[in-house]
Image (cartoon, helix red, strand yellow):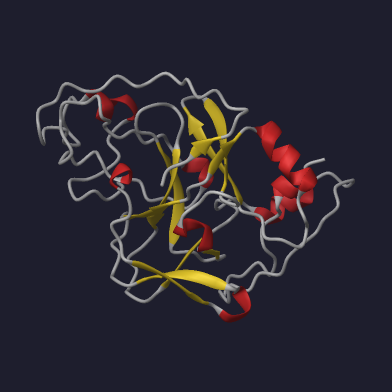
Amino acid sequence: MSNVADDTLDKLTERYQGCSCQAQSCTPTSSCSCVTRFGPAFDTRGCLLDVVSSADLLRPVLECNDDCRCGQSCFNRVVQRGIAVELQVFDCGRRGVGVRTLQPVMRGSFVCEYSGELLSYESVRRRAQNADPATHNYILEVREFFGAKLLTTYVDATYVGNVGRFINHSCEPNLFVQPVRVENAVPRVALFALRDIPRYTELTYDYSGGGNITDECDTRQDNVERKRKPCLCGSSHCRLFLPYDDTLLVS
């Protein structure tokens, strides 16, 4: 399942023009228009070339689409094919439920999307104002540099979602978030392996996007009510509290 737009978003986005490559010719070193638009993203195994944990370093990733001539076997089609890793939702005790992999996962491999409703900032504010503080927040905020611009995407998995909504936070995660575009500028929020992951390992990502939470807390406005939730990730690098929930603190 991919993201669906809420009523406040413009659904009529401009489609990217497809490439004219022949089957299996969209290699990282080819002149494929999809590959060269932002630079090659995947190797021939379908693993992401840029494996980074910091949201400030993310660059756009563009896959080939249905308007391309290269066909479904093209190496530059990864996220659109859906989950290729066998996953299991399981009981994590005090942390509720989580997700683990039932097979080894190679560094840079696509694991799953974080699917839900694609929200505008106005919709995020409205839902935050009506949210129950005692319930879990499934709105994910993703920042990336798109050319010279810093873009933010909001995805809410509260009402519409997939297995990605059950993946827990960790201060020392084994996954990271990467926006991936297929047919237009609206990104799919994809989770990739930050390192090699053995089978039966719980999958986690940093809800802060890898940013410096300590600095972020120090610079936050004093008139914002600071509600912190304890972090139970168990990492030796644990920051003790979950990242600030920006979407629930917007006034």
Answer with the quarter of the image where residue 213 lies: bottom right
Q: Which residue sits at x=34%, y=68%?
A: 197
Q: Residue 63's x, y, as percent?
A: 30, 35
Q: Which residue sits at x=37%, y=21%?
A: 15
Residue nearest the viewer, comparing 122 with 36: 122
Above or below 234: residue 79: above
Answer with the quarter of the image where residue 22 lies: top left
Q: Residue 32's x, y, as percent?
A: 20, 26
Q: Residue 100's x, y, as percent?
A: 41, 71
Residue nearest the viewer, comparing 99 with 204: 99
* Quadrant containing the C terminus in the rendered view: top right
Report whether 118 appears left or right of 108: right
- Residue 249 visible at all: no
Report whether 19 appears left or right of 233: left
Q: Residue 131's x, y, as percent?
A: 76, 50
Total marks in image: 0
Above or below 63: residue 1: below
Q: Which residue sits at x=53%, y=42%?
A: 56
Above or below 231: residue 71: above
Q: Which residue sits at x=58%, y=56%?
A: 207
Residue, far bottom: 93
